[in-house]
Amino acid sequence: MFKYLKQLTSLVAMVAVLFTFTTETMAAKKSKTLKNTQKKGFVRCGVSQGLPGFSNADAAGNWTGVDVDVCRAVAAAVLGDASKVKYTPLSAKERFTALTSGEIDILSRNTTWTLSRDADIGLTFVGVNFYDGQGFMVRKSSGITSTDQFKNGISACTNIGTTTELNMRDFFNSRGISYEPVAFEKADEVVAAYDAGRCDTYTTDKSGLAAQRTKMSNPDEHIVLPETISKEPLGPVVRQGDSVWEDIVRWSLNTMIEAEEYGITSGNADMMKTSDNPAIKRLVGSEGELGAAFGLDNDWSYRIITQVGNYGESYKRNIADTGILPDRGPNELWTKGGILYVPPAR
Amino acid sequence: MKLKKILPQLATLFVVVLIFGFFTMNAQLNMENRGIDFGYGFLTQESSFDVQFSLIEYSGSDSYGRAYLVGLLNTLLVSVLGIIICTIIGVIIGIARLSPNYLIRTTAAWYVEFFRNIPLLLQIFFWYYAALRALPLPQDAEAIFGASYLTIKGFYTPSLIWENLDIFIYSVIAAIVAIVFVRIHAKKLRENQGKHLPVLNISIAILFVLPLLTFLFGGVNVGYETPELKQLAKTSFKFEGGLSIPPELLSLVIALSLYTATFVAECVRAGIQGVGKGQREAAASIGLNRKQVLNLIIMPQALRIIIPPTTNQYLNLTKNSSLAAAIAYPDLVLVFAGTALMQTGKAIEIVSITMLTYLTLSLSISFFMNWYNAKIAIVEK
């Protein structure tokens, strides 16, 4: 009989372990993500595997970019320190699974907001931090200056698992051009293959083309064609089902944009505390109780502005000054001819 | 006692069921919480993405189910080509390693040690990026044998255009059936009357004569189409017409076969060395010549040692073919577990289908090789 006692004990232990897991899942509360984040002491952020201007790591492992700044803003709001972010580089293919499975809490990785992604896969898009569109890059020497000059049999390098693949098909089909899609898993592989001459054109979001061009062996040999073939509103994504967390991420982004609108920068935020404008005072935390709605203190937005800066500062630092896209185009405030327009923080 | 035997097994079964049950329930619960639907209905939906290279007719207006088939066939293509080539190279290298010639023996040993000890993914990258970069652009390519071109955009060679291809295929099938009959007859003749028929010569003759007749009388005709250079833009060209093999397929097959061939070579060498020296000497002593010794005595016994480990290598090659995703070859993993997964978001469904497919593939290869192994095993009388 003793022979089986050992087996029986291990069986009981196993069952016990299983039940502990189950009860933990059952205990899921409304703002579980916020609680977990505060407990861990860092924000878990999914970023790209290296896209200059958006999310890119330097040799020392420091991440910079406008997508990275969204995660830093959330860390500043929730934890009080913008540097408390743990970055997980993800391929286009892995990103949604990483988010839905709970490996990360924010996906801020130049991800296009589409109906099917928003509705189907258990994700919620919280806003747009970059308005983009798909374009084509070709070699200057080819003499191509417009997509009208594309001919049957053109080969196009791109990434798998992106809206790019679908847009490309719509584009070529609607024009009746036959094409050869060559789709890689990683952006670096696409660039290498295009650079080697495997493809006649490289297609992805225009911001991506501009950023990847800087990685080519000779950037001046390539041009991005003027046509934009799709709308690509890029923005941060969270898991469906935690509306408090969703609001925190949404309003961290909105705060950055609204701060620019009111002219609040990381440099002048302190002075703005005594401003006459109540909208400004609310943003720097000297009036109102905006943080309470998320379970945060009142300085949450002040910390975002002082530690990360407003949207304009972030754009300038990451995208304009690095020579990727000096012109803000549609990513200018609505008051200055762009389409950046966020609901009021009140 | 019977109970003593059954009880531990029942307990194990219970635990296994419990674990699977827990994972299924956990997945179900979490998916429900996050508002993710579960179901295989997406397979009939329109896929709306294109694939670079497909053995069957496919476009984005076809279903995800067909995209799966495209990926599966591409995986099979790479696996079959890889298995054939790695077997040929492997057998040659394996025998070369036992060559009495120092140069051949050492070269073969170097080949094995070199290719076996570099990670496969690195080799795939080498063949795709390093070797590919060295290839010329289409407009600079020199013709090979007058009409074939190896360029950075792929290998282009003339393709045959058939008239009444079906009749030709029937004639080849008929020839194969005829050869099988000849072999059976020859075996009977040898066993019953001790007569030797020149089976090989007869077989070759049948294989040539029968299809040839269809050209003369069956209305079969064959023409060919050569690849032509076409200008897309000022400096961008491509070849059109003929047969084109994408560089992704080319480099994947090269990398997989060169890598796996090293293991096959070791299996072959081990198999031949595993046959006792006495067998060779005994065979020689009854007057068999070198060729007969190898064909009738050594190989039948060596094969029994070679086949089981070689099966493993075939399985490895098939599974390794999933590394194709790294170089844009549209195999099952890239097309189905890549693009289709991303577009539908059905991670659990698609990964489960993909896993089941590889399992089925591997088990089929294993099953076939086991059958072959049983067939050539010694029948004890």
Image: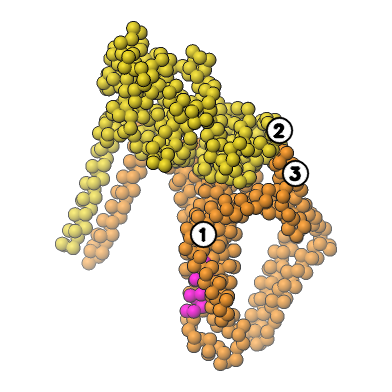
Chain colours: A yellow, B orange
Sort mark 2 into few (<14), some (14-19) or many (20+) by Cα contacts within 10 Å. Answer: few
Kindly tell me whether residue A262 is visible in this rendering: yes
Residue under circle 1?
A: B317
The location of residue A180, given as percent across then percent down, is 64, 42
Residue under circle 2?
A: A149
Viewer-closest of B199 and B324:
B324
The location of residue A176, given as percent across then percent down, is 70, 33
Determine whether the residue tagged by mark 3 lies in a helix, strand or loop: strand
Report the quarter where the N terminus of chain A lies.
Answer: bottom left
| Tag 1 subunit | B
In the depicted structure, whether residue B40 falls above or below residue B78: above
Q: Nearer the viewer, mark 3 or mark 1?
A: 3
Q: Is residue B282 magenta?
A: no
The region drawn magenta spans: B262-274
The amino acid type found where label 3 is placed reads Lys
Q: Would you say A241 lies left or right of B177 here? A: left
Of mark 3 and mark 1, the one earlier in the sequence is 3
Sort mark 3 into few (<14), some (14-19) or many (20+) by Cα contacts within 10 Å. Answer: some
Q: Does the magenta stretch include residue B265?
A: yes
